Image (cartoon, grey):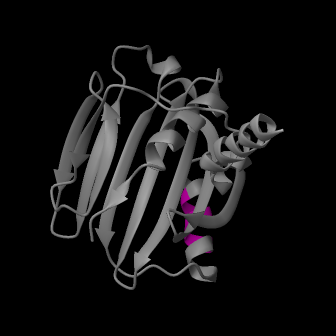
Amino acid sequence: MRKFSVFFLLIIVIISCKKESDLSKEFDCDYEGLSNLKTYSDFKNNFKIHIPTSWKTTKYYSDVQSEIFTADTLKQLTETYILKTSYALGSLNFDTDFYQKTDSIIHQNNLKKIKSGTTTFIELPTFWYVVKGEKNGFSYHQFNLISKKGDLAYFTASVEIYGDLNVNERICESLALLEKIEFLQ
């Protein structure tokens, strides 16, 4: 009987250790993550992200924004994705004006919103959406995440996905990277 109790307790611990985020649930992700990761900090030390060592990664900054761009350039464009993460200064309010501006940008770029929602991402209020269209002669999907980091700062992530194969899997893989972001401020 004691062995059964220990086994049962072990199963409960294993199940509870893997806490799936709301976004992972939304996309029905069953993804463990990538390996051989290197830690990158943005130029202004606002956040750290863990990216595979074989990926091409570049950084950019201005007075109000700090960005990291990355992609697996060893794969074909229609088999990978381009991930852009950014920390910016400015106020952000998820109000009617925000949603109207977002919809206007989507419309101006001839994209169609597939799904969207609000959630808490890394303990931050977040709006996310997925759009579809055509870009550079390819079918194109984009996953966007916008998180309010405080009264005067916000975090964004954009995942560009070319082609129609394994779109959900590529979103899940990018979420596995994004969910491990560490904010430094």
Give the residue furthest to the right.
1
Magenta span includes 97: no
How far across and down, in percent of the image, does residue 41 sit? 21, 51
Give the residue furthest to the front.
1
Q: Is residue 50 left or right of residue 116?
A: left
Q: Is residue 121 left or right of residue 82?
A: right
Residue nearest the observer in this picture, 37 or 141: 37
Q: Main secondary structure of the magenta part?
A: helix
Residue at 62% across, 38% down: 133
How far across and down, in percent of the image, does residue 37 sit? 32, 32
How far across and down, in percent of the image, does residue 78 sit? 52, 19
Q: Is residue 179 visible?
A: yes
How far across and down, in percent of the image, does residue 27 sit? 70, 43
- Residue 99 vs 86, above or below: the answer is below
Quadrant of image for the N terminus: top right
Residue at 32% across, 25% down: 36
Q: How many marks?
A: 0
Residue nearest the observer in this picture, 83 or 141: 83
Residue nearest the observer in this picture, 139 or 11: 11
Residue at 15% across, 69% down: 63
- Residue 7 vs 108, above or below: the answer is above
Quarter of image, res 18:
top right
Stretch in magenta: 100-105
Q: Is residue 111 visible?
A: no
Quarter of image, res 185:
bottom left
Residue nearest the observer in this picture, 83 or 185: 185
